[in-house]
Image (spheres, grey):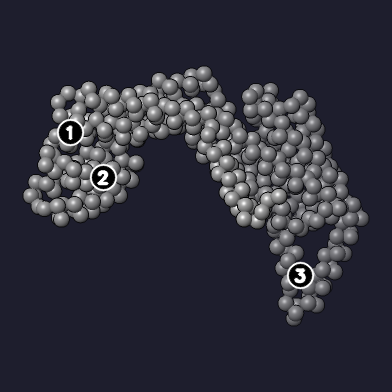
Amino acid sequence: MTTPTARPFRRAIHHIGAELTTVVTPRRLLHTAKTAVAATIAWFLGHLVPGELGEYAYYAPLGTLIAMVPTVAVSVRASVQTLVGVVIGVLVAWALLLTGSGGWITVPLAVGIGTLIAGLPRLGPGRDYIPIAALFVVVIGASDADAFSLGYISQMALGAAVGVAINMLVPPPLETKEAGDALALLREDVGRCLRLFADSLDPKEDMHDDSSWTRLLNDVDRRSAAAVRSLAELHESRKGNIRARREPGQTTSSDQMLLSLQRIIRQLYEFADLFLEREETNSERADAPPDDEALARGSASAHADETAKTADTAGGDALGSTTVRRAVAETCTAAAELLEGWNPATGLAPDGAFDAAREALHRLEKVTSEDAGRSTFDREQLAVVVHTTRAVIAELAARLDP
């Protein structure tokens, strides 16, 4: 039996274990092993540098740590930017030492001027090393600034070169799986939106509840942003990576999928605007001022009479007849099935999915043209629904039709 005092301890252990599972991964273990090996190699090579420069071999592993980042391209860029930052910091320190001022002046000025210059955004991670390099030269190497500065820069460059070389020889894995997972989650949420719209067209469902729409669209926005970031990381991981030669078309298909999903998301907002507009109109009618209650009742009565006439002639409601709504729902469901069945590996949809989608769209266009007796406002709403549904099917056909 667990005592009350032991429960927080067990929760902490469980939390630590969950955190470790996100850290101890094959990708992270490979990166750790590469970093340890590269730092060791840089340490030994640093001692082989002739003359006084070899005395500063302890800076070589530091240069390796800077270069050992998850992607080859970022490794090269971070190394160059860091070396530039170190050189700038050294120059700042030399300028201060030439003034002959004491440490109580050069130390704060080295840190202050270095921090000020570090505000330059183009230096990337290298800007953080400007005040560090300036401080090191002023404090540690003040007695022999020339030798210390050259040793510092050369050993950092040596370590960075070793790190970049190890990253190229043993390239990190591509971010293909992460990008694929992000796109799969985005497809899933977009499909859920289409199915929600189809369910909302059921006469038994509440047409004016927009909470589900708002929640789902927020999820879609987050998933879309995550997919964009994942694809950007995938592109970055391929630069200078020999693994990219094995999957030459992977990023192209992923980019096309993301582009199609973004276009479909824009159509989803057309659906959402339709529902939210209807909800806002109904809310304004319900919240009419007391002085206008009679007018509101008269308007509602007139609207009810018009709806009744429409139902007599077309058998429908605000979005059209039950037949039209069913046709729209079937088309949205077919589009969701196409989307959910999208195979990223082959770029194709399930067999028969396109035939079902085209038949549903054909029925929708047929019953829409036959439906009559609707007001102008409702015709505009229905036109938005039909156009949006057709656009979704067309976008999927452009990507998935074999």
Q: Which of 200 and 171 is in front in this view?
A: 171
Report the mark closest to the observer, 2 or 3.
Answer: 2
Graded by Cα atoms within 10 Å as few (under 14), some (14 to 19) or many (20 or more), the crowding at tag 3 reads few
Helix, strand or loop at label 2? It is helix
Query: In the visual, does 14 lie left or right of 382?
Result: left
User: Looking at this view, is 231 or 242 the one in front?
Assistant: 242
Q: Which residue is drawn at 77% across and 36% down?
A: 334
Q: Earlier in the sequence, mark 2 or mark 3?
A: 2
Which quadrant of the figure has residue 193?
Answer: top right
Residue 17 at what x, y percent from top left?
A: 57, 41
Residue bearing mark 1: 150
- Which comes before the other along the chain, label 1 or label 2? 2
Query: In the displayed image of the protein, which residue is found farthest to the top?
Result: 246
Q: Which amino acid does label 3 sit on?
A: Ala
* Residue type at numbered disc 2: Ile
Q: Quadrant of the C terminus?
A: top right
Q: Residue 107: x percent and y percent?
A: 19, 52
Mark 1 and 2 residues: CB-CB less than 8 Å, in contact? no
Q: Where is residue 289 in the image (x, y as percent from the top left)?
A: 72, 77
Would residue 91 be visible to someone looking at this image? no
Q: Can residue 3 be seen in this view?
A: yes
Q: In this view, does 215 lie to the left or right of 333?
A: left
Query: In the rendered view, does 191 fall on the left or right side of 106?
Result: right
The structure residue drawn at horizontal position 26% and vertical position 45%, both measured from the top left corner, is: 132
Pointer 2 local density, CA inside 10 Å: few below 14, some 14–19, many at least 20: some
